[in-house]
Image (cartoon, rainbow, N blue to C red):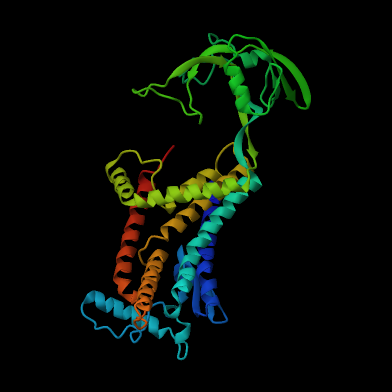
Amino acid sequence: MAYAIGVLILVVGVLVSIALHEVGHMVPAKKFGVRVSQYMVGFGPTLWSRTKGETEYGVKAIPLGGYVRLIGMYPTPDAVGNPPVRGFFSRIAAEAREASAEEIRPGEDHRAFYRLSTPKKLVVMLGGPVMNLVIAVVLLGVIYVGIGTPQSSTTLASVSECVLPAGSTATTCTDDDPISPGAAAGLEPGDRIVSYNGQSIDSWDQVFQLIRADAGRTVPIVVDRDGQTLSLQITPVAAERPQVDENGVALTDEDGTVLTTEVGFVGISPADELVRQPLSEAIGLAADGTWQTAKAVATLPVTLWNTGQSAFGGGERDPNGVISLVGVGQIAGEIGAADGAGLAQRVASMLSLIASLNLALFVFNLIPLVPLDGGHVAAALWEGLKRQIARLRGLPRPRPADAARLQPLALGVFVLLGGMSLVLMYADIVNPITG
């Protein structure tokens, strides 16, 4: 049940993100006088709709996207000089122009999208992706500022019963294993370390570093247990433990062998606690996530090829590779069903997942290919460039850019995206990312 609830929350989050993306297009379009005839979440058959004013608002059966219908997206045949129709692609463009022109009511040509200035077109077309970016920043702000992020606390989560050799895979102690210093000192899970060897303790890293440097020395340790202060004596033992970098990642040599060193060890581990962060952390994370997503999009052909090979030819998936909505749904289900995670941590993980999806939508929609928003942005910029060149050269204002000529490209991109989605969904079903 928890798994299904996680998936359901994801579906709702995606639908809300799509709906707000389309609001980002619709609001400025209406502000600039463009008639918006439809606002729809989803594709396919209409499940529900209501007309308010001049716009039909509705929900469709397939929740894989959405759209707003802006009248006059493409210039009319007259506006672009009635270009001749020659060949298959030319006919597709002509049909797109005619279909767009049919949406323009008599006397409303001035309300057509193609009549907007270049800056206004950019505001309308960028409104959707920018809305996704805003959603991501808001969600990350809720996580970092409102909920907090997990950090190691000075409260103990567990106390080992014995000292196991470095690299041991054993999960239980035997009679031959020496008792751990933590257990010998009487430490218990839930104890909060107040001081160590006379030093007041403020963080787990402070405890960690002090213990590592005290092998063989008996030192006093003060803990708070259920509101009572206890003074204990503890003697860290010398144990071989992996060397780690500043991020806590184990260091290895050229052969991949984990490097070890002899340090003090007592056999205790910290409990995580949620610590609230400043808003700047959320903004920084959104910026870094955007950059990482952009790099992933730039290498998408190679990543998709590798994913296809792993799906159809076997082999492990790249844990940092792209996934489909099926894979995202699996992650959402695992978050919902995670054992030992508190409600706040599950909420934070789910919001983080939805924020990541919105960052992906922001970056992906900026690709300068129709039918993506970035394709319409590129067309508007081209039109604006032609107008500026004509103005500087003292030439008559050029005709509107014939964006309908990009319609054959849009169909090709649509087929390509559909094929990519199918490959990723297949890979997420037969060879999902694990670990």
Residue 91 in which image quadrant: bottom left
Count of all numbered marks drawn on residues in the image: 0
User: Is residue 141 shown above or below 149?
Assistant: below
Give how far across and how far down residue 387 sits, in percent.
Answer: 38, 76
Which quarter of the image is occupied by the C terminus? top left
Splitting the image into 4 quarters, where does residue 114 fall?
A: bottom left
74 with respect to 328 (left or right): left
Q: Residue 148 appears in which quarter of the rendering?
A: top right
Q: Is residue 383 visible?
A: yes
- Please state which of residues 207 and 62 is positioned toward the viewer in this rendering: 207
Q: Residue at x 56, y 53 (%)?
A: 137
Relative to 269, say whether 292 is above or below. Answer: below
Left or right: where 23 falls relative to 366 = right
Relative depth, front residue between 128 and 164? 128
Residue lying furthest left: 87
* Residue 80: image location, x then y, percent: 33, 83
Considering depth in this image, is 252 or 330 the residue closer to the camera?
Answer: 252
Please tell me which residue is depicted at 64% across the width and 47% down the height of the picture: 145
**In the rendering, at what x and y percent does residue 154 appear?**
66, 28
Q: Residue furthest right?
A: 228
In the rendered image, the residue lying farthest to the front is 393
Task: Name the residue at 65% across, 48% down.
Answer: 146
Is residue 260 shown above or below 321? above
Q: From where the camera sits, is residue 71 visible?
A: no
Residue for point 58% across, 52% down: 139
- Residue 398 position, x and y percent, is 35, 81
